[in-house]
Image: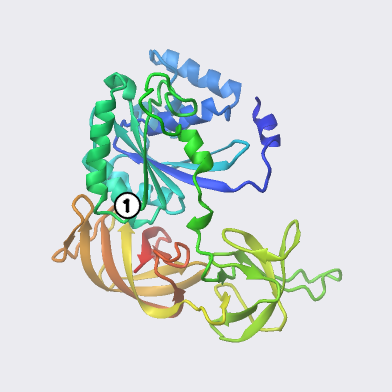
Amino acid sequence: MTKKNQADTVDSSIEILRFTTAGSVDDGKSTLIGRLLYDSKSIFQDQYEAIEEVSKRRGEEEVNFALLTDGLKAEREQGITIDVAYRYFSTPQRKFIIADTPGHIQYTRNMVTGASTANVALVLVDARQGVLEQTRRHAIIASLLQIPHLVICINKMDLVDYSEEVYKSIQNDFENFAGKLDVHDVSFIPISALRGDNVVDRSDKMPWFQGATLLYYLENVHIASDYNFIDCRFPVQYVIRPYSDEYHDYRGYAGRVAGGIYKKGDEVMLLPSGFTTRIKKIETYNGELEEAFPPMSVTMHIEDDFDISRGDMIVRVNNVPRQEQDIDLMICWFHEKPLQERGKYILRHTTKEARCIIREVRYRMDVNTLHRDVDSRLINMNDIARISIRSTLPLFVDAYNKNRITGSVILIDEGTNETVAAGMVI
């Protein structure tokens, strides 16, 4: 099936599943994604022939599917992933956005970037190596980022003769460790990304495993309840005013629903003004809707002429977020230059921008043991720490474990405009 024909069979209304891959170096993350793309017929024939030719030229016995995702020259030369590589594919059941993240410790920040919006985290474990330090590190980050579903892919089963004992041993090791984490849905799948066992098609080499293949799991895992449908949050991203004769009085407020369900006629409150009004109508490019919910991008119209601008938020009257300037955050530090206590940074939260100062570093977390190092005030690149900040403007925030959108921020260096940290509201 060609890519075009496949796309024709996929309904545009099908939900999107975002998933990230993580694990130690050489656990086969890129190979697994390449295998998924190939076996689900999501690449062109000439792409396959190109990587087949490169694999032969490099003297490799098998087609190296990792070449489909390792886009940087340095990645192809070293056979590793450095940057986050995003890939897209679809089946008749679902659309998928994949974030292939690096395994090296020094690229932990890239793993945080790829995992921040994921519904599912695939953590790969080399069947020969078992659960390693970096495996635990990535599982802890997945837990901190509140990724709802965790899949432990025990890879390279072909190199341990498809042994059920090896699989059970690794499963037990990880379950003992995961008891300390805030993870509620963990699944285990024994695979061989190189050979394709249990990736798209069920393997006849592991009859002892009665669970789903990886693709079947990804197509069927329930993600609708991952969003917060209780607390209505609509950060305004853009005010639409066409200024044309045809749409002379048109005034719409565009954005992405971050939580709750909005319906035509609902009474809502506008923040920060506190004024109340009702929803006049809800629109998308395809026409008017009766209701909107996460993660839909819509345009809302209200009945009264109130002043609303980018960064404001439309919420329910009796369900408002916290309005705070002093905020506690768990952060992952991204930059080579260490965090500066009492340093000033630009802060972005949903569609609002403000400036902030780092009031205090509470502790640095050891992501291998979950130990809190309260004596360390030096936060370097890839460190995870708890800090408190004070912003110049009040922010409308929820705890990150309540809403991943209104509970997250990024910090930006004022001088270079580089993103230096991602933060989760406690």
| Identity, as a three-letter code, of the amino acid under mark 1 | Ile
Q: Residue furthest right?
A: 245
Q: Residue furthest left?
A: 375
Judge whether residue 150 can be spotted in this image.
yes
Q: Secondary structure at mark 1?
A: helix
Q: Give the quarter of the image for residue 31.
A: top left
- Please tell me which residue is depicted at 33% across the width and 68% down the height of the picture: 329
Q: Nearer the viewer, residue 173 or 305?
A: 173
Left or right of 219 in this view: 331 = left
Judge whether residue 101 can be spotted in this image.
no
Q: Residues within 10 Å of mark 1 (few under 14, many from 20)?
A: many
Left or right of 365 in this view: 38 = right
Q: Give the quarter of the image for residue 389.
A: bottom left
Q: Nearer the viewer, residue 414 or 332?
A: 332
- Please tell me which residue is depicted at 46% across the width and 18% down the height of the picture: 54
| Quarter of the image with the N terminus in it | top right
Residue 308: give x, y in percent of width and height. 62, 79
In the picture of the structure, the residue carrying the numbered disc 1 is 141
Relative height, residue 130 to residue 326 (above, below) = above
In this figure, which colouring scheme has been used for the structure?
A: rainbow
| Quarter of the image with the C terminus in it | bottom left
Relative height, residue 340 to residue 178 (above, below) = below
Residue 305: give x, y in percent of width and height. 71, 83
Residue 160: give x, y in percent of width and height. 27, 21
